[in-house]
Amino acid sequence: MSEKPATKYFDAVVDELYGVEPGEFVSLRKRYEAQARREGEKDLAERIHRLRKPTTAAALVNRLARKHTDELASLVKLGQRLRRAHRDLAGGRLRELTHERNERVHALLDRAQALSRGRVGEPVRREIEATLEAAVNDGESAHAVLEGRLTTALSPRDVFESALLTGGSGTEPKRAPTTPRLSEQQERQERQRARRDAEARARQARDDARRELRIAEREEAKARRRTEAARAALEAADQEVRRYTR
């Protein structure tokens, strides 16, 4: 690994890790971590080890950033036009752009569904939609989405309402005071809280999938019984026909 700077190598590893399916993340991270340790790059190995596995929604948005870059970039540009229209209080333009935003978001949701081979449940779909809305609403979220390294879903900021409250002055709405930097303990607590929230969402998605499976299994059993009954009726009818055609 000496032929390439550790930072450049780390960035390449991050890009690869956050571009794979969630099920491949841990094994690939372990492989790169082990490789770094074998080559004596302990600090690099630790940085790789600390990389967080993305949630299902975040992973799909990351894949959108790689597979459908142009569509995602167009959505971000649309967000810039929407914010200008809000500042100018251009009602007609706002309605037109809002309609376009909805269409683009729904198209990208369908793209995400296809990338997951149709395995996206409603809770995950809502998280993806919220993340795309966040990319429309503010530049920081847009940058994070386009970078394709999300670990969790994003929540839209209410910047449009703030823009309206400025009275359409044509300037960016004032941001809230910057939150003081968290202490290590607070950061750890935030990570734990995020992990618990992600676990709760994952459990909910699992429970939803389990219910859907039970419903499908019941329907399948009913269909099987109907098929068997229909087959028996057909065989009986055939025997009756043969009885009179001998």
Image (cartoon, grey):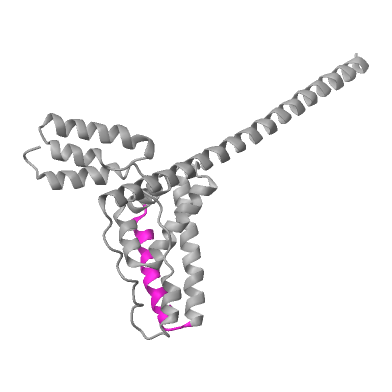
Is 112 rendered above or below residue 86? above
Residue at position x 30%, y 61% from top?
Answer: 143
What stretch of residues is rendered in magenta?
Answer: 68-90
Residue 155 lies, in percent from the top left, at 43, 59
Residue at position x 40%, y 67% from top?
Answer: 137
Residue 133 lies, in percent from the top left, at 44, 62
Residue 184 lies, in percent from the top left, at 26, 50
The quadrant of the rendering that contains the C terminus is top right
Which residue of the protein is positioned furthest toward the right in this rendering?
A: 244
Residue at position x 31%, y 57% from top?
Answer: 144
Magenta stretch prevailing secondary structure: helix
Residue 59 lies, in percent from the top left, at 38, 46
The answer to which image quadrant residue 30 occupies is top left
The quadrant of the rendering that contains the N terminus is top left
Q: Is residue 115 visible?
A: no
Residue at position x 41%, y 66% from top?
Answer: 157
Q: Is residue 112 visible?
A: yes
The answer to which image quadrant residue 39 occupies is top left
Answer with left or right where residue 103 lies relative to residue 149. Answer: right
The answer to which image quadrant residue 169 occupies is bottom left
